[in-house]
Amino acid sequence: MRVLLIDDEQFYYKLLKKTLKEAEYDLEYAESGNEGIAKIPSFDPELLIVDLKLPGMDGFQILERLKRDTKFGHIPVIVITAKDELSEKLKAFELGADDYLVKPFQPEELVARMGILARRGKAMAGKGTNTNKTQATVIAVHSLRGGLGCSSIVVNLGLAFYKLWGKQVLLIDGILTAGQVALMLDAKSPATWENLVGINEENLDDEVVGEMMSDHKSGIRYVASPRFPIATDTFSSDILKLFMDRLKFQNDFIVIDTSHDFSDMAINMLSMSNYILLVMAPEMASLRSTMSALEIYDRLGLSVDKVKIILNNNSSNPAIKQVQLEKVLRRPIDFVLPYEAGEVNRALNFGQPFILTNPDLPICLSLEKMAYTLSDDSYKAIPPAVPSPTWKRVTASLGSK
């Protein structure tokens, strides 16, 4: 296995050289980011070990370059750094790092982690995962305050994606204590997050992942909340990342109902998403929690560009006007959902998503336009061969503005 180490400290090259050779790894070395990038095409590494603090092009910039590279963007990356800071770790994972190791470390630990990545790569290649397939667009719906309609948005937004494009949509109930996604679909799932308990990386193959996804009669799929609460730290970051990686290759759109906190699981879901939809209501308590969430996103190093605010009007007479909310937040609200209490409550009580039973509601068009806006440009560039009524309605509405 060819390994490229990019680190300005030669000490680590000397430290690793003998150990990796004994483990039958072919090690190449670069002292700077620019040198490392230059060596990738000729050396064609199967694994990169990258220090974050490098002269010139740093480790984050290397990750960004790789992320945009269609030929070498698949190479697994282990990031090494002298700082054990959560914000740096999350930023590295967001940019595509596969593992993170803090200096000083023992060579044997690095070799063990390399072995895990190598086995993961073989499993992804050998058990049905199509690495040439475009990965899903992942959307995490989040709020620090419950009762704002997050689960309802997840279910109906997911259905909007399906009605719009006819592609494979997966809903993930990321709330491990009484999640509501299956209830809102009036569905009894044969599998839940409980199926993943005790599964290690070597056993987490496409068959296990496939069994965790339940089919709904509407055409979408979902991962259900456990029947009984389980701890949010039950699943390691490595398991969650591998699980999500496999789901991304088996679906076109993934919408996550994220827990109302910053647990390890919630942070992992947020960092692995393309978009974070932060839900708020026009009231003071919601405004305060929204401001707190935005501040924590910033501390975690989550890109401001991926955060979109949804104003869900839960009252016919909002206590705070949108313009006032935007003034306090110092940023525009990206999406607004109109007040629809009666139909929304009926849908919740009967497990019948309103976007299916009453698609002419104004809130349905708002969610459909949201789905269109969040879709990749590759979908919007070419009209579908057989446009759906939803696609016609959305494009007509957007075209008239």
Image: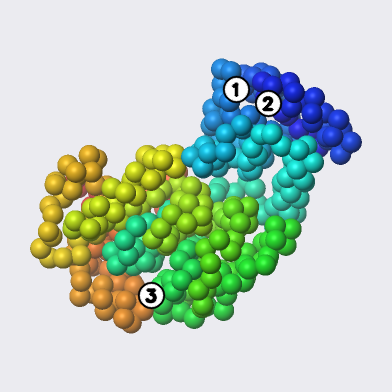
Side of 346 where 190 appears, left or right: right
Rendering coords of residue 67 (x, y %): 56, 35
Report the residue at 55% width, 49% height from top.
135
Residue 226 in view: yes
Rendering coords of residue 190 (x, y %): 57, 79
Residue 54's label in the rendered image is 1
Rendering coords of residue 388 (x, y %): 36, 60
How many C-alpha atoms fall within 10 Å of the one at disc 1: few (<14), some, or many (≥20)?
many
Relative to 102, say whether 40 is above or below.
Answer: above
- Mark 3 — residue? 184
Residue 6's label in the rendered image is 2
- Kind of element beneath mark 2: strand
Three-letter amino acid code at the position of disc 3: Met
Three-letter amino acid code at the position of disc 1: Leu
Side of 215 where 353 appears, left or right: left
Report the residue at 65% width, 31% height from top.
50
Q: Are marks 2 and 1 in contact (CB under 8 Å)?
A: yes
- Kind of element beneath mark 3: helix
Three-letter amino acid code at the position of disc 2: Ile
- Kind of element beneath mark 1: loop
Camera-nearest residue between 93 and 289: 289
Q: Are marks 3 and 2 in contact (CB under 8 Å)?
A: no
Side of 153 where 136 appears, left or right: right
